Image: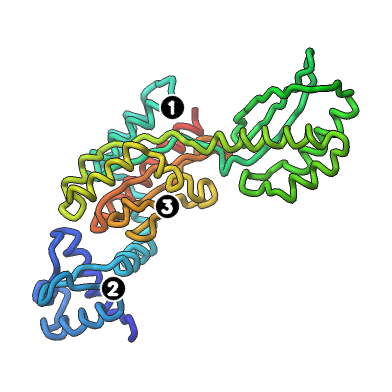
């Protein structure tokens, strides 16, 4: 069965009506749209086809229809394509946003917390903002330096110039030539790699090339892995969690409790706010229902956008709401937020 233009127009009308009312939409309601010159019977047949194709479903017998995740996905993708230029327009919140950006603050946390509050108030959904982090925690440089009293200092520099130091105890003295060889081995093998790209075979090969210093090379490698891994826990700010109760489909006691627990504990948000960080230059990701990796958000839509703190260091701003959220408003607000953050941080 083909999804022709008429079916697309009817699907779009059903979704828009459902976004406004939260109630199942019937064929008679759609027939009243000014730009439809179709009878309720014709629209009913088209809606039945859309249900068969998986874009709509009937929650009750003889009731109207509501969009499925696939229906929302088609709607959002077409909207993004049609309105890509319009979505960059200034939103009503821009003046308030500019006030936040113009504040002189010593800590980036203050800016991001204020931005989360403003975004939640503006959209009437829940906002999530992550602290900036290096793109996939890629190793930029490693240096080992001999110190007095049998100590070896391992300095690890990650993208974004995040520096980690680790002290290693030596059971024997190393001369400068050995130190130079170990430094060359480390950097030739590991530079530019992420934690996910450092595997067992690579570690074994490096230990083999280190010869009599294989044990030391392995210890240094473990220090580097620990340093990269320690950056995985990002700080996340949330606001507007109680906005969940505005929407009946999310305010069921068990569902709302799970969602609020996720927002409070924040651990489950880490993957969501780190996914494709810095790799998607457009910065916009829309997750609908089952598309999200967070179980408590399977009945939600989540939209995230990436901002740049400095070269190679990124953070994310997100909005969590019902599947019938005002996608256009949220996308426009996120465009404004990330654009303002980019300007502030690159300017500062």
Query: Which quadrant holds residue 77?
Result: bottom left
Query: Which quadrant holds residue 209?
Result: top right
Q: Earlier in the sequence, mark 3 or mark 2?
A: 2
Percent coordinates x, y for residue 297 in the rendering: 32, 52
Q: Nearer the viewer, residue 340 or 166?
A: 166
- Residue contact at pointers 3 and 2, CB within 8 angstroms: no
Label 3 – label 2 distance at C-alpha: 23 Å
- Residue contact at pointers 2 and 1, CB within 8 angstroms: no
Query: Which quadrant holds residue 324?
Result: bottom left
Q: Which residue is mark 1?
A: 108
- Residue contact at pointers 3 and 1, CB within 8 angstroms: no
Q: Which residue is mark 3?
A: 284
Label 3 residue SS: strand
Q: Earlier in the sequence, mark 3 or mark 1?
A: 1
Taking the spot 28% from the left edge, 46% from the top edge, the residue there is 259
Q: Which residue is mark 2?
A: 55
């Amino acid at each position: 069965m083909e999804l022709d233009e008429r079916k697309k127009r009817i699907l779009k009308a059903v979704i828009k009506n459902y976004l406004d009312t939260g109630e199942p939409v019937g064929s008679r309601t759609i027939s009243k749209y000014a730009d439809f010159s179709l009878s309720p019977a014709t629209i009913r047949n088209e809606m039945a086809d859309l249900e068969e194709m998986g874009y709509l479903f009937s929650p009750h017998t003889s009731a109207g229809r509501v969009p499925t995740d696939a229906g929302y996905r088609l709607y959002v993708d077409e909207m993004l394509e049609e309105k890509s230029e319009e979505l960059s327009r200034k939103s009503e919140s821009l003046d308030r946003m500019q006030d936040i950006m113009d504040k002189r603050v010593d800590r980036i946390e203050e800016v991001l917390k204020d931005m989360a509050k403003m975004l939640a108030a503006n959209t009437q959904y829940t906002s999530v903002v992550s602290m900036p982090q290096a793109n996939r925690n890629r190793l930029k440089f490693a240096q080992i330096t001999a110190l007095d009293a049998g100590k070896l200092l391992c300095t690890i520099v990650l993208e974004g110039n995040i520096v980690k130091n680790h002290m290693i105890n030596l059971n024997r003295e190393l001369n400068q030539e050995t130190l130079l060889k170990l430094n060359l081995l480390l950097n030739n093998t590991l530079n530019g790699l992420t934690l996910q790209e450092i595997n067992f075979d690579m570690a074994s090969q490096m230990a083999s090339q280190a010869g009599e210093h294989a044990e030391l090379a392995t210890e240094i490698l473990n220090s580097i892995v620990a340093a990269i891994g320690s950056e995985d826990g990002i700080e996340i700010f949330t606001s507007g969690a109680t906005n969940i109760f505005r929407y009946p489909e999310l305010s069921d006691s068990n569902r709302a409790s799970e969602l609020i627990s996720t927002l409070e504990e924040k651990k489950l948000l880490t993957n969501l706010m780190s996914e494709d960080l810095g790799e998607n230059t457009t910065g916009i990701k829309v997750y609908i229902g089952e598309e999200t990796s967070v179980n408590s958000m399977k009945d939600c839509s989540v939209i995230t956008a990436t901002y740049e703190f400095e070269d190679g260091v990124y953070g994310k701003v997100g909005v969590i709401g019902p599947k019938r959220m005002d996608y256009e408003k949220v996308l426009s607000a996120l465009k404004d937020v990330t654009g303002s953050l980019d300007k502030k941080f690159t300017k500062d």
